[in-house]
Amino acid sequence: MRIKLALIMVFIIAALAWGQVGIRPAAFNVDFASFASDSAGYNSFEAYYQVYSAHLLHVREEGKYVANYSVTAIIKDGKKQIDAKEIEETVYAESYEEAHNPKNYIINSFKFYLEPGKYKIEVTLNDLNASSSIPLKTEMTLPEYANDRPMISQIMFARQIHEIDEPTGFDKNYWRVIPSCSRRFGDGINWVKFYYELYNGRLIHQTEFTFAYEIRDRKNKVKSSFSVTKPNNEVNAFVDSIQLSDLKPGNYDLVVYTRDSNGELVSRIGSFAVHWTALELVENDFNSALQQLRYIANSREIDLLKKTPEEERTNAWNKFWKSKDPSPDTDINELKNEYYRRIAYSNRTYDMPNKEGWRTDMGMIHVINGNPDDIERHPFDIETKPYEIWYYYNPRRRFLFIDVNGYGEYVLQYPYDGDVNKRINIYGGGP
């Protein structure tokens, strides 16, 4: 019971404190795609970003709420910087509620022309009012779109696709394609929409292509599939969508492939995630929704929810969370929002092929305690298993995780009561 109460107090304090700072976790998303360019030997490499304005620090100026931020994109070949761009923008809101509306966001993009090869990409969101930054780093290998064989471009996942009316920065041949920078679908977005290009190489006389689409889970099992026939045009740019009705929350691969007239396979894979809101989970998979409450609800509360008739489940779930609301007179339940934000983060960060991220030991500690103040990582120490130590300063706690089996799942080691003087045994995988 003391753990539950401590968890509630931590969430309440976090929710109140975050109202006073600038960038918060999940403030923005970044995605990338590359296509063949008009310049032979170069990729048209596009970096998309999505900034949630509610996560920026707004300053009151002349009756309005103003946020100032910039986004920088840096491309490196090894340690050498070969290109960089920056976009600086100002966001205006007429009211406090508009400034802090979690549904408001800005999407923009950078474009680079790069030779095929492996690059390090760093995109950073800078909150200029708060003097804080969030860098997102990744590595990408850009393919060589050769002229002597058919190839499929990288897949661009989309929030919206529609015909072009006035020119914008998101026009792709015949369509306006607004990117899904998070590649997360569900949560009211019930279709996976995507755009890709086919470079037909020597197959200019082939009149059409039949494309197969497959959605595979992380165990490589096909969960959905169908095929479409597309004409072979001078510019082969295609859009399509797949309904999510049969896909549960989790990580998936979209496989697009076709065969040329010689039977040669041409394919491309892109990854995406399906996410249900907590309410959608209650309505579609009540048992899973109850399991997600294990870090916040006691056994009596879980038993009561289990016994709830099906037609009353949504009301019972809402009543449960209302009982935990630190500010019941407002429309926002800070504790609930923070709890499910941590679950979503754990699913993105600690997900394993056979286990959702929030169910892992790292996910559990993150949901209960939030982001650690410091992480000590030891992935390659000699004669030891890979391990991490998470430190929390207030209250003073330390958690040791060891990759016991070498599969990438770090297991929490006991005891974990926060006594930093206790011995750490990283050699045998136990306390």
Image (tube, helix red, strand yellow):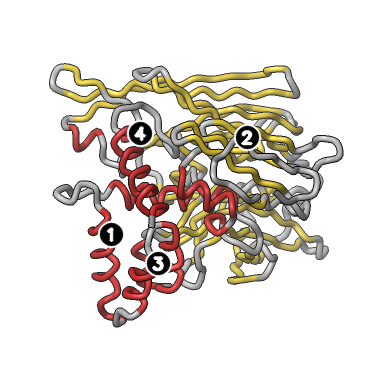
The quarter of the picture where residue 53 lies is top left
- Residues tagged 3 and 2 counted as in contact (Cβ below 8 A): no
The three-letter code of the residue at mark 4 reads His
Front tag of 2 and 4 = 2
Q: Which mark is residue 309?
A: none
The three-letter code of the residue at mark 1 reads Trp
Residues packed near mark 2 inside 10 Å, few (<14), some (14 to 19) or many (20 plus): few
Q: Which mark is residue 421?
A: 2
Instruction: Using the rendered image of the protein, determine whether residue 145 is visible from the camera's viewpoint.
Output: yes
Q: Which mark is residue 321?
A: 1
Horizontal relation, residue 227 to residue 54: left or right: right
Of residues 281 and 78, the one drawn nearer to the viewer in this rendering: 281
Front tag of 3 and 2 = 2
As helix, strand or loop, the secondary structure at mark 2 comes to loop
The quarter of the picture where residue 92 lies is top left
**Of marks 1 and 4, which one's residue comes earlier in the chain?**
4
